[in-house]
């Protein structure tokens, strides 16, 4: 899954794809590099990001989505109205960092056949990194995801449509993220495909001392570890390089 942020203030690319044509060209480049899914987002969820209205979010993503009808597009949104509009415009997947907890979110998806990513986040984006605490981060994230899968299924979203994600960096310290990565296989017990988004995140910055635009090597290491522990979808900025790493690993496990 390649990332396209149609935002002026994303942590990872600093707004380079905010303009419609730049976002479309970037999505096409990621698909050519081997992304099976392109994840388009119009709201930055990094702490401190400026709030965006529903209208603005729609204005950012819909023109991009409409120009990419031939690709498998995921839309990263927390808003039911944006989910519904994105599905009308041809999105195949909704990536919700709030795991369909917003009122009306489940209903927005129920009648469609789209896939949905249910992600764990502790707290709200603006404040989630203020001293997050867990007794056992893996157990708590797993219990949350289990509950959200059950809620989605009970509301009529078939299990085959659901992907789960521990939400690296969303209300988690670097130590929490490393524990989750190390024990990622335990989340495989939920029986849903596992998505991991570690690309360029601050834990890599903490481990390597590098800024977001110099975290490629760290991101590739994280991606490989995630796949080895059961992730089947990687949300990444650097598709070509990630593909190469996974191809080398797959050649080895195929021997
Ligand atoms: C939107 N977004 C930013 N980081 C993410 C992650 O790790 N997972 C998912 N599903 N979405 C993310």
Image (tube, rainbow, N blue to C red):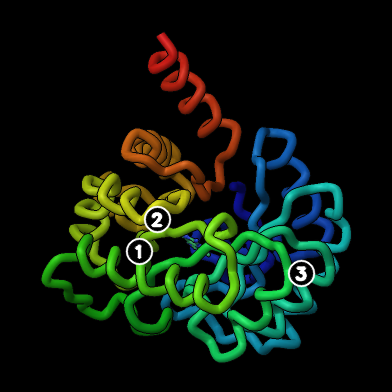
Q: Describe residue 151's horizontal placement relative to residue 25 as left or right.
A: left
| Disc 2 residue: CB within 8 Å of ligand 1 | yes
Q: Position of 162 compared to 68: left or right? A: left
Residue at mark 2 to residue at mark 1: CA–CA distance: 7 Å
Label 2, label 3: how far apart the Cα atoms are: 28 Å
Mark 3 or 1, which is nearer the eye? 3
Which numbered tag is attached to residue 169? Answer: 1
Residues tagged 2 and 3 counted as in contact (Cβ below 8 A): no
Tell which tag, 2 or 3, sits nearer the viewer: 3
Return the disc, 2 or 3, that comes first in the chain's sequence. 3
- Residue linked to disc 3: 87
Answer yes or no: disc 1 within 8 Å of ligand 1.
Answer: yes
Residue at point 43% right, 71% down? Answer: 150
Q: Position of residue 21 (x, y in %)?
A: 84, 58
Residue depicted at x 83% and y 54%: 68
Image quarter hosting the C terminus: top left
- The answer, for residue 40, to whether it is visible in the render is no
Q: Residue at x 48, y 66 (%)?
A: 118
- Please report contact status of discs 2 and 1: CB closer than 8 Å, yes or no: yes
Q: Which residue is mark 2?
A: 201
């Amino acid at each position: 899954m390649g990332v396209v942020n149609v935002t002026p203030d994303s942590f990872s690319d600093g707004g380079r794809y905010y303009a419609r044509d730049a976002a479309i060209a970037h999505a096409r480049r990621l698909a050519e590099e081997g992304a099976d899914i392109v994840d388009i987002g119009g709201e930055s969820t990094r702490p401190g990001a400026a709030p965006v209205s529903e209208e603005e979010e729609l204005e950012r993503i819909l023109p991009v989505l409409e120009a990419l009808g031939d690709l498998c597009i995921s839309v990263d949104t927390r808003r039911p109205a944006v989910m519904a509009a994105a599905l009308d415009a041809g999105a195949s997947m909704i990536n919700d960092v709030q795991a369909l907890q917003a009122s009306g979110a489940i209903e927005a998806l129920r009648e469609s056949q789209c896939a949905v990513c249910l992600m764990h986040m502790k707290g709200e984006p603006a404040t989630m990194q203020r001293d997050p605490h867990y007794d056992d981060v893996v157990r708590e994230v797993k219990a949350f995801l289990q509950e959200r899968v059950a809620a989605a299924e009970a509301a009529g979203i078939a299990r085959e449509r659901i992907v789960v994600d521990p939400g690296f960096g969303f209300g988690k310290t670097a130590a929490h993220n490393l524990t989750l990565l190390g024990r990622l296989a335990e989340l495989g017990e939920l029986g849903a495909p596992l998505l991991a988004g570690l690309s360029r995140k601050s834990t890599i910055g903490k481990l390597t001392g590098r800024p977001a635009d110099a975290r490629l090597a760290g991101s590739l290491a994280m991606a490989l570890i995630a796949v080895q522990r059961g992730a089947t979808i990687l949300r990444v900025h650097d598709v070509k390089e990630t593909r190469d790493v996974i191809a080398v690993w797959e050649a080895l496990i195929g021997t």
